[in-house]
Image: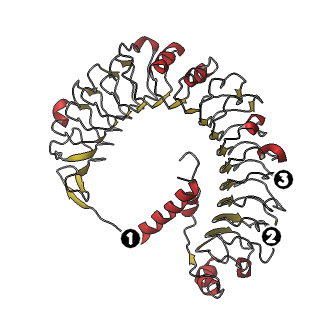
Amino acid sequence: MLATERVLLLLVSLLSSLFHCEHSLAFSLKNCTILYSENSNNVSVTCAEHHLTAIPDDIPGNAVSLNLSSNDISNISRMDLGGLSKLEALYVKNNWILQIDDGTFVDLVELKVLDLGENLLTALTKNMFQGLSKLETISLNNNVISFTSPVVFQPLVILHLVDLSNNYLLDSDIEWEVSNKTFLRSLTRLHMSETSLSFEVYRAILQTAYSLQEFQMDNIKKWIDDGLIDVACQIPSLRTVDVRNSEIHNITEHMLQSCSNLTELNLSFNNINSMADNALQSMTQLRSLILQNNELSELPVAVQRLTTLEVYDLSINDISELYCPYFWNLTSLTILDLSHNQISYVSECVFQNVNNLKILNLENNKIMSFIDTFKDKLQTLEFLNLRNIDIMNFIQGDFHSLSSLQYLYIDLDECDSVDEGGFEGLDNLQILYLLGDNYFYDHFSGLSNLNTLILNENSHRLQRDVTHCKLVLTKIRVYTTVFCFVLFKILPHYLYTNTNG
């Protein structure tokens, strides 16, 4: 789903929640609440945040979901979950669980999701997950696991996602011996971070995950220089690599040389300040590149050759200049995030040839004007964020070519002059979020499809605007209904959807 469509769905969801309340039938057990769905044979049970020290003994046998999160449970035995043969999702995160008996889950033959994160588990024993042949996702993050049986995951024959991040796995405490080389054949996602495993153990794990498609690594900087990313990329099925918080300073020529099959690469929240010009030359299928929150002061040259790139996130860096040829070969680009940089000027040729761009975020930069920046360009753009920038002059015709634009966020707070008809050409604009006082209603002429106007919370004219905007704007015949929502602290968060979300 396109990010613009997600934005619209979030708006609809938000407005629906304001005007419509759809209640499901709810009944209380001794310590829990049962939520009945349209299918009375399936019930969801929530016991979260009830200070429970043990799993209640009155969980109905037709429960398909059970939430026991945020309690004081310290151990789970086989009797605690006996008879729950229809359960598909079990959430027991954020408890004090020290012990799970072997065979505890043997009756949970339909279980697909198991969340045991944020507990005090120290060991994964041989038969702990016996019976979970349909399990697809298991979360064991943020425990104190220091030992795992070599065969602990063997019953999980269709497992897709394992999260072992933030544990105390050490070389001396973990074995990765797999006599049956097919038992992880269905594993598609693996997330590991802040472990003390050796490079050899990581390699052994990756060499048994034949179907791995997504590999996320956090805080494992010491093995990056030794080529761990390169090892992961040798798995033919791998499509996504996510390496965050690993203090990478430089993307070298050889670091990603085996990653020719990747379609998504996330290197956010590192300390990247440089990238070799040919660092990405093998990545001919890359569609998404996230370099958010690094220390780049220049646009990395290596990206210019990525003709398949659709999503490019350079937000929260130190880039000051956008030079003209840079984006010209990125003809597949649909989402571009340059927010929170030091950009002061965007010349008229920067976005030439970027004919498929739908989302452009320039928020929090130092741009003062857009003279011919969008002229005869970006005809497919649907979302434009110009919030918290230093526009000094808002000139008629600045947006004339943006005929597909549906969502616009613009800050006129520092503007010296606003031309009448500054919004001309925005024939499909539906939502306008306007910061600043320097405007008159004549400036809105031509916005025939506008249905939501959001005004600045700090505007000195706010009370008058909210009272009169409907009356004034409906006098323009091209308008149908214009709603003025004073949701200034809520909507900006929902209207911009992060490309990783």
Q: Locate residue 433 relative to residue 100 in the image: left or right.
A: right
The residue identified by callout 2 is 397
The residue sitting at 77% across, 40% down in the picture is 299
Choose top left, top right, bottom left or bottom right for residue 159: top left
The residue identified by callout 3 is 349
Badge 3 element: loop
Residue 202 sits above or below residue 326 on the image: above
Please identify, in this view, whether the residue under mark 1 or under mark 3 is nearer the observer.
3
Mark 1 to mark 2 CA distance (whole Å): 41 Å
Residue 194 percent across, percent down from the top left: 51, 26
Residue 447 percent across, percent down from the top left: 67, 76
Residue 116 sits above or below residue 353 on the image: above
Q: Are marks 1 and 2 in contact (CB under 8 Å)?
A: no
Query: What amino acid is labelled 2 in the image?
Result: Gly
Let me know if residue 296 appears in the view. no
Choose top left, top right, bottom left or bottom right for residue 168: top left
Mark 1 to mark 3 CA distance (whole Å): 47 Å
Q: Nearer the viewer, residue 83 or 490?
A: 83
Query: What amino acid is labelled 1 in the image?
Result: His
Query: What amino acid is labelled 3 in the image?
Result: Cys
Identify the mark nearer the N-term, 1 or 3. Answer: 1
Query: Could you classify mark 2 by the number of other residues whose Cα lies within 10 Å: few (under 14), some (14-19), or many (20 or more)?
Result: many
Badge 2 element: loop
Query: Could you classify mark 1 by the number of other residues whose Cα lies within 10 Å: few (under 14), some (14-19), or many (20 or more)?
Result: few
Q: Locate residue 272 relative to residue 149 in the image: left or right.
A: right
The residue identified by callout 1 is 20
